[in-house]
Amino acid sequence: MKRIFIFLLFLISAHCYSQQIVRLKEDINLYDENFEVVKILDKNKKIKVSQYEFEYHKNNNNNEYDYYAELDDDFQGYRVQASKLIPEKSEDIFNDDLITKPGDVYFIDEFFQGLKFQDIKRIYKCYENTIKKAEKYNDYRDWKECCSFYQKSTYITNSQISFQNYFSKFFGEITNIKKDKDMYELYLSYYFYFDYNQNRILNNINLQKEGENTVFYLKIDGDYISLYYSDKKTLINTFIRTKKQTQNEFEKFLKTESYITSNITWPRHADGSCDYDGSKNTTTPSQGTKAELTTSLTNISTNKNMLVRENLKLRSGEATSTQVLAVMQAGTKVKILELGKAETIDGISSNWVKVEVQAGAKDKEGKDIKKGIVGRCYGGYLK
């Protein structure tokens, strides 16, 4: 596996020299390589960042780690705090609570699913094809060492965004931010992307691995940060913010298949609900109306053929925030391959299920869905 990972690591660690011009959000310190304060730079001053990717350093003056940008031109070799930079001509900026703070860590849904069900296979299956190819080499490196996102190279700032581990990377250089209702519209002068997670299937767009002057969208839902393509519909990935202690338990789980539950901080949506601890909101009857009873469906099981009750979205993962692969027409036959997390939706208690679409399937427009497509759907809408 080392050969593949060396190539991926090269892509991740390579520094591309940028000509990004930014301005200062406030008066900030200019540091030399020893983190001695050289001078104070004034608010709104324009400076040039020398490298695409910010660096995670320990400032010995305050004994804290933070993200720093290395500068160019008149300040070549000096550093400033990355969180204090904003695009030169940006119309808006992110809310402060979205900006990455020291100690913030990012997961994907499959990591929390693995922890919740104590099932390491849920994580392995994300990268199974890549891992199997790499296992053929004598210098194979255990995939469990490669899952966590690099704390040093994963961050959200007003001028750059970056999510990186061995298996995936999305990096973008921001030139403008616009608030668009519950989303942020991002203008990226440059982006770089790859993802070997088999649950991320972008069949309906041709997203190049590298591009310039492209629009993306960020949708924020509590601890969930979803990245969408410019059509606002195609989900590229959802990143979930958590803490270092959770990452430590996750890495312990990968090695020993056990962890201390009390050390896990389960993520929450903006409404306070959680997908992993049973607190997900269920349908509540309104005052003056007949109470809606919660129905528990237990007739789903693996290897069972079932029919779609009504038009139903086939998704890449076990959450309504994941990518829609197709909308299956009522009557579509599917085979249940695997039971997933339990959840109550619209007063129905059931499980998310991994299914394989059978012959004769149609989408909501009556067009054919290719036999054998695999995805996830909510089992409460199967019969």
Image (cartoon, grey):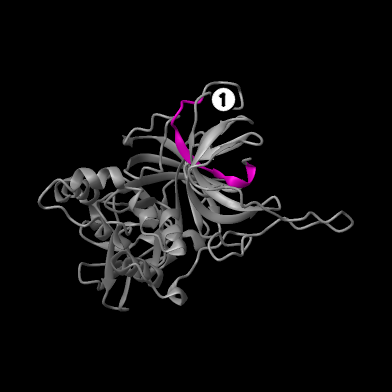
Check the image and report above or below for 243 versus 70: below
Furthest residue toward left: 138
Is residue 168 rendered to the left or right of residue 270?
A: left
The total number of labels drawn is 1
Query: Is 373 contained in the magenta span?
Result: yes
Identified by mark 1, the residue type is Lys
Furthest residue toward top: 367
Q: Residues within 10 Å of mark 1 (few under 14, many from 20)?
A: many
Residue situated in front as seen by the camera: 60 or 347: 347
Q: Position of residue 335 (x, y in %)?
A: 50, 38
Check the image and report above or below for 207 versus 150: above
Q: Is residue 26 visible?
A: no
Residue situated in front as seen by the camera: 67 or 343: 343
Residue situated in front as seen by the camera: 4 or 304: 304
Q: Position of residue 299 (x, y in %)?
A: 61, 48
Local secondary structure at mark 1: loop
Question: Dot 1 corresponds to which residue?
Answer: 362
Q: Is residue 35 visible?
A: yes
Q: Residue at x 39, y 63 (%)?
A: 105
Check the image and report above or below for 158 versus 245: above
Q: Residue at x 42, y 64 (%)?
A: 118
Question: Residue 308's image quarter?
Answer: top right
Q: Position of residue 125 (x, y in %)?
A: 35, 49
Is residue 299 rendered to the left or right of residue 49?
A: right
Query: Is 348 contained in the magenta span?
Result: no
What is the span of residues highlighted in magenta in the rendered image? 369-381
* The C terminus lies in quadrant: top right
Q: Position of residue 146 (x, y in %)?
A: 26, 57
